[in-house]
Image: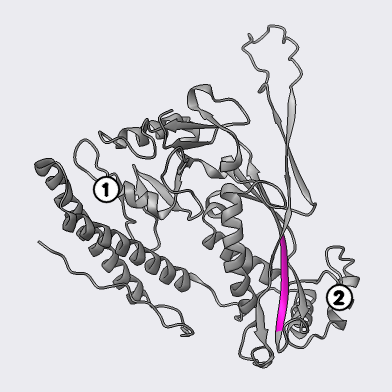
Amino acid sequence: MTRHFARPRSRKEGEEIAAGPTSLEVVEAFDEFMAAFEAFKEANDERLAQIESRVSADVVTTEKMERINRALDEHKRLVDGLVLKSRRPPLSGERPETSLSALQHTAAFEGYVRHGAEGQLRALEAKAMSVSSDPDGGYLVPDETEREIGRMLSQASPIRAIAGVREISASVYKKPFAITGPATGWVGETAARPETNSATLAELTFPAMELYAMPAATQTLLDDSAVNIDEWIAGEVQVAFAEQEGAAFVSGDGSNKPRGFLDYTAVAEASWSWGNLGYVATGVDGAFPASDPSDVLIDLVYALKAGYRQNATWVMNRRAQGEIRKIKDADGNYIWQPAAQAGGTASLLNFPVAEAEDMPDIGSDTRAIAFGDFRRGYLVVDRLGVRILRDPYSAKPYVLFYTTKRVGGGVQDFDAIKLMKFGVS
C-alpha cells in the first residue's frame, strides 16, 4: 500500500504572522510528519525484503525511501518551527513588578537604538558605576532583552539546550575538582577516626570569549513605533549567535572561542582516563556493521555509567540520524522513534536525540555520534551583559548594531560523555 502525504508547507519570505501559528496548524503539521514516518517505514521494509530475496535492493525502492527520508526531515523542521513560534511570548506586553530604574533604562535604551540619543543612557550607566560598557564599547541592553536573547538561544542552539549553563560576572570561570576523590572509610561507633589524606586538587578553567553579530536596520524601521525594538534585536542576533555557538560547542579549538567536546583527545573506552573522552568503535571503517548494527549503539549506551545514563542524550546530525532510522532491533522493531507529540524530541533506544548539524557525517574514523549526560559533562559559561554599539555611518543609509556577548565552554566531566567512532578500532 502506498501512502500519500502532503508536502510541508513553507511560508513566503517576509510574510508576517501576527499572532503566531494556531494549535490546529501545529496538530496538522505533526499529523503530516507522522504520516511521512509511516510511509518511510513501509518503503524501508520493502527495501529490506528485496535485499533478503534478491541480494540487493531495487533502485526505484531505494530512491523512494531516500526521498521520503528527506521529506521526513523537512516535516520535522516545520513542526519544530511552528511549535517554537507558538511558545514565543510577546516582549511588548505588561511588565509586572518592574522597578523604576529598569523602566528608565529600557526607555533610554530605546531612545539610543531608534535615534542615537545616548546622553540619558550614559548617565544611567555612570550612575550605576557600570564597568562593562562605555561609549566606545557600546551600552548594556535591558535585562529583559538579555533574558530573551538567552531564552531564544537555548531553543535554537542544540548543545546549549542540553548542557549545563552558568552565568558569571568575571572573564574566567575556574572549577576545582579532586583528582584522588574523597577520602572515606568505615569505622566503628566508638573507634578512633584515622586521619584522612589530603585531597589532590586540580582546576578546570573556562574563559569567556567575545561573540558578535551585526544586524542592520533602515531608519524607517527604527522610526516605526509599532516595531518592538527589544523583540527585533533579540530575533536578529539569535540566529547569528546560535550558529556560531553551535559550531564552537561541538568542535571549537578554544582559541578565541569555546572548546568543543570533539576537540578533546578521544581514546578507546578500554583505555579511558581523566582528561580524555572514551569512544566505542563500530569495527567497520566509515559505516555501521552490516550484521546487527544496533548492537554497537547498545554498546555505546552501556559504556556510560548508570549515574549518567538516566539523563543521557544522543547528539548527531540529520544525515547520521537518517542512517539510524533504517536500523531495526533483533525483534524487527525500529530503534529510532519519532516524538510522541508536537514539540517533543525523537528517541533512539528510548533516549532523546538532539540534532546538531555541526556534528560530522558518518565517514572513515569520524566520531559522528555522541551519547552522554551533557548537563553534567559540558559546561556553557555566559558572562552577564549583552552590549550594543549603534553605527549609522559605516553602511549608510542602513544603521548597524554591533552586538556582543561573552561566552565560554568546555568539558567539565570527562566520564559523562562517550563517542562512537566509525572505524575498525
Q: Disc 2 and disc 1: Cα gap in Å?
A: 59 Å
> Mark 1 falls on what kind of element?
loop
150, above or below 412, in the image: below
The answer to whether residue 402 is magenta is yes
Q: Position of residue 15 (x, y in %)?
A: 46, 85
> Mark 2 falls on what kind of element?
helix
Q: Amino acid at mark 1?
A: Lys
Taking the image as drawn, is residue 220 in sight? yes
Residue to which mark 1 is pinned: 326
Q: Amino acid at mark 2?
A: Leu
Residue at coordinates 72% horizontally, 66% vertically from top-left?
404
Q: Position of residue 11 (x, y in %)?
A: 40, 80
Q: Which residues are magenta?
A: 399-405
Q: Position of residue 150 (x, y in %)?
A: 62, 63
In this rendering, would 4 be left or right of 88? left
Label 2: how many Cα within 10 Å (few below 14, some 14–19, many 20+): some
**Residue located farthest toward the top when viewing the structure as drawn:** 191
11, above or below 37, in the image: below
Q: Quadrant of residue 188?
A: top right
Nearer to us: label 2 or label 1: 1
Dot 2 or dot 1: first in sequence order is 2
Please tell me which residue lies in front, 56 or 402.
Answer: 56
Residue to which mark 2 is pinned: 124
Please identify the quadrant where the N terminus is shown. bottom left
Q: Position of residue 171 (x, y in %)?
A: 79, 51
Residue at coordinates 35% horizontally, 72% vertically from top-left?
26
The answer to whether residue 120 is magenta is no
**Most common secondary structure along the magenta stretch:** strand
Q: Quadrant of residue 23?
A: bottom left
Residue at coordinates 68% horizontally, 67% vertically from top-left?
146
Please identify the quadrant where the C terminus is shown. top left
Evaluate if marks 2 and 1 touch, with contact meaning CB atoms under 8 Å apart.
no
